[in-house]
Image: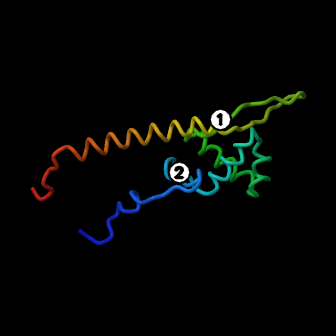
Amino acid sequence: MSSKAPLADLFSKSFEKPSDLLCCAFGLRDTEIDVYFSLITGPKTVKEIAARIDRDRSTVQRVLTSLKDKGLVEMNEQTFERGGYYHVYRAISSDSVRSEILARLDRWYKETRRFLLEPWADPLT
């Protein structure tokens, strides 16, 4: 075996803040983390988020779509009195995110355990 195993980092990873775990569990990038945490304090529009994290609106919109696809953000349509509409985004509660991470961790553990307990085929045959 090599002195630096590829999985060594996985088993020695420590989490010091929620963003560390979100990065790992959902594959979030820095801007996605910034957008998600900007919504923790309450619902916001794209314009409000962009101002809060100092990013342009198109970047924020793209990130919100990604976070929606990952199940971390919900979008609600609001209407203007004079007609038209806009979207307001809110973060999924931290309790829901924790539950999802725990469920993913349980699935990963069960699948990894099952795999490790099965006989392994000889790769040279």
In the rendered view, does 28 fall on the left or right side of 2?
right
Q: CA distance from mark 1 to mark 2?
A: 20 Å
Residue sitting at x 65%, y 48%: 62
Judge whether 7 appears above or below 118 on screen.
below
Query: Is the residue under label 2 in contact with that under label 1 (CB below 8 Å)?
Result: no
In this view, the residue farthest toward the left is 125
> Residue 2: percent from the left, percent from the top?
27, 71
In this view, the residue farthest toward the right is 82
Q: Which residue is mark 1?
A: 74
Q: Nearer the viewer, residue 61 or 42?
A: 42
* The N terminus lies in quadrant: bottom left
Query: Helix, strand, or loop for circle 2?
Result: helix
Total of numbered circles in the picture? Answer: 2
Judge whether 23 appears above or below 65 on screen.
below
In the rendered view, does 22 fall on the left or right side of 85?
left
Q: Earlier in the sequence, mark 1 or mark 2?
A: 2
Q: Which residue is mark 2?
A: 21
Name the amino acid type tagged 2: Leu
> Residue 11: percent from the left, percent from the top?
39, 57
* The C terminus lies in quadrant: bottom left
